[in-house]
Each structure stands twice: as structure tokens, then as C-alpha cells.
Image (tube, rainbow, N blue to C red):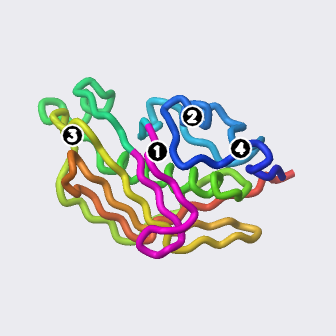
Amino acid sequence: MFNPHDFHTPQSSYTRGDLLRSSAGGYFGPGNAQLPAPPMLMMDRITDIGIDGGAFGKGRVAAELDVAPDHWFFACHFAGDPVMPGCLGLDAMWQIIGFWLGWSGSPGKGRALGSGEVKFRGHITPDVRLVRYEIDMRQVRRGRLVLGIADGRVLADGACVYLAKDMRVGLIAPTG
């Protein structure tokens, strides 16, 4: 298994180009965490990422998505009433937690493992310009299974529209 820090020097922020390189695989080393490729990549940049800080002092991440009225999901969800599916906001937060785990030096392929409480308090429509994701790492276990547990929120032009608690992402070691 490859050590992610042998392939990547952690930065405090990442551009869209950096995130696209992560989605191509190998950014954190062969077989390690990677982001999905567009159109499932649900962020344009990571504006702040740290190993400590956040609500629990265990790490934090802030990322952003520039919303355009022609984003693919608006055309199909729903005809005549376009709304970004809430599951995509939740998936974005899982993507960010998996990225943080690789960024912080843990090996393995990222997989969403579930979530505790999720609340939808609003929605993201084509008139929204900026979605901001804020993730606070609650707990990190580094063993045979690397597990990140975090709370997060999604803001649409500054208004909180989704809250999620106890989101879980695991890094699975390659078999064979």
C-alpha cells in the first residue's frame, strides 16, 4: 500500500485543476483516495483544509461549487421546477471527507459508509450563484479500516440549506 504523502505534499487550498487531477486517480498514490470525475465532481475548489481546527478540533474543510443555470442536474430534476438533488449535496460532503482522509496521509480507496441525521432546510435552484460546503471532522480512526466521521453543512449564497451529522467515509485497503 502506498503512503499518500510520498505522492502529494498537502496544501491549504486546491484549485479546480488540482481536483480534476485527483479525479484522474493516483493523486495520493496508486489505489488511494480520489475524487469522482465530472459531472459527479461536486466542487470547484477547496478554499481551506486543515488537520486541526473545526468544531471538534480534529480537522476542517471548506469547499465551493459555482452554480450555473445550465448544470446537468437542473435539466432533469425537476422539469419545470429545477432543484439540485439533495443527495448530490450529501455526496459532495462525502467526497470532501474522502479527500481529507487522503490529504491527511491515510491510504486506501474512499467509500461513503453512511450518515446519521440529515436535515434539508432549503434547496439549491438555478438562481443560486455559490454553494459552500463546510465540514468539521468529528473523529478519525486509522487502522486496518481508516474511518472519518464528520458533521457538515451546505450553504446556498450564504444560507444554510442542508445539515448532516455523523457522515462516515472509509478508506478501504486494496485486496490481493
Read off the magenta span. 45-63
Q: Amino acid at mark 3?
A: Val
Judge depth for marks 1 and 3 and give the one in front.
1
- What's the CA distance linking mark 1 and mark 2? 9 Å
Q: Residue furthest front?
A: 12
Residue 84, image quadrant: top left
Q: Residue furthest left?
A: 80
Residue 66: percent from the left, percent from the top?
32, 34
Q: Amino acid at mark 4?
A: His
10 Å neighbourhood of mark 4: few (<14), some, or many (≥20)?
some
Residue at image mark 1: 46
Left of 96 or right of it: where is 120? left
Q: Amino acid at mark 1?
A: Ile
10 Å neighbourhood of mark 3: few (<14), some, or many (≥20)?
some
SS label for mark 4: loop
Indicate which disc, 1 or 2, sits on the residue closer to the N terminus. 2
| Residue ID at (84%, 52%) | 1
| Residue ID at (23%, 59%) | 120
